[in-house]
Amino acid sequence: MSLIETRNAYDVTADTYSVSHARWLRFAGGEAQCAFEGAVSALLRPGMRMLDAACGTGAVARRLLAGVNGQVDLVLLDTSQRMLNRCSGIPAERVLGCMKCLPFDDDQFDLLTCAWGIETLADPRPALTEFVRVTRPGGHVCLVFCADRPTPSLVGRVLRHSIINSGRGTFLNCQNLRQLAETAGAERVQMLHCTGPAAAMILHI
């Protein structure tokens, strides 16, 4: 899916995204989301500079900020202006931009998160390269994404079909993504334990 198509898809669904995404988490992606947020919370410290790429409505950022009393220099980035508008109450810099060409200098962030964003790209390699580039040595990139793994839930299978057919993303092979992250420059890639049609990983930079 092209950048324009992705932006248009999320502009159209900005007002209803939270409801549909909550359904996905309940029936398919919740375990991966919990693993992802637990890992990020363990890494996050007051005073860190953090980028939330493909921030969406800012729901993840709000929960993470609550854990450190908002004492983080946070930047929110999304390709959809309507999604960024939903983040207006978050104490953060909001940037309209694309994951494949981040508008930041090298080594700018201690922590970078991307929740349910990398799978919206036709090719994740440019975004992974950018994620590594803007993250400082010793920092971390945390991802949670739709994964090409079976789900025992009928509702989960229906939701998977809906995501693919709506053009909002694909389901990524975990091993392939891991290899791409290593090629992009990650020192080490750690898969988090979770099941179902979703996965979470940490890139150690």
Image: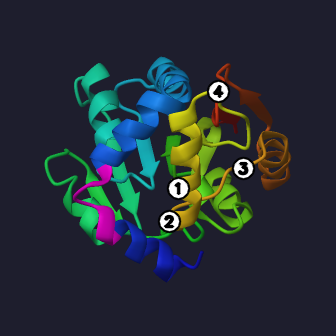
First reached walking from the N terminus: tag 2 or tag 3: 2
Q: In this view, does 197 lie to the left or right of 68?
A: right
Please tell me whether residue 12 belongs to the stretch shown in magenta: yes
**In the image, farthest residue toward the left:** 89
Q: Dot 3 corresponds to which residue?
A: 172
First reached walking from the N terminus: tag 4 or tag 3: 4
- Tell me the SS state at disc 3: loop
- Magenta residue span: 11-17
Q: Residue at x 34, y 25 (%)?
A: 46
Task: State the mark number for residue 163.
Answer: 1
In the rendered image, the quadrant that contains the C terminus is: top right
Q: Which amino acid does label 2 sit on?
A: Ser
Q: Is residue 68 visible?
A: no
- The scheme the figure's colours follow is rainbow
- Quadrant of the rendered structure where residue 50 is? top left
- Quadrant of the rendered structure where residue 86 is? bottom left
First reached walking from the N terminus: tag 1 or tag 3: 1
Q: Can residue 11 be seen in this view?
A: yes
Q: Which residue is drawn at 49% across and 64% down?
A: 104
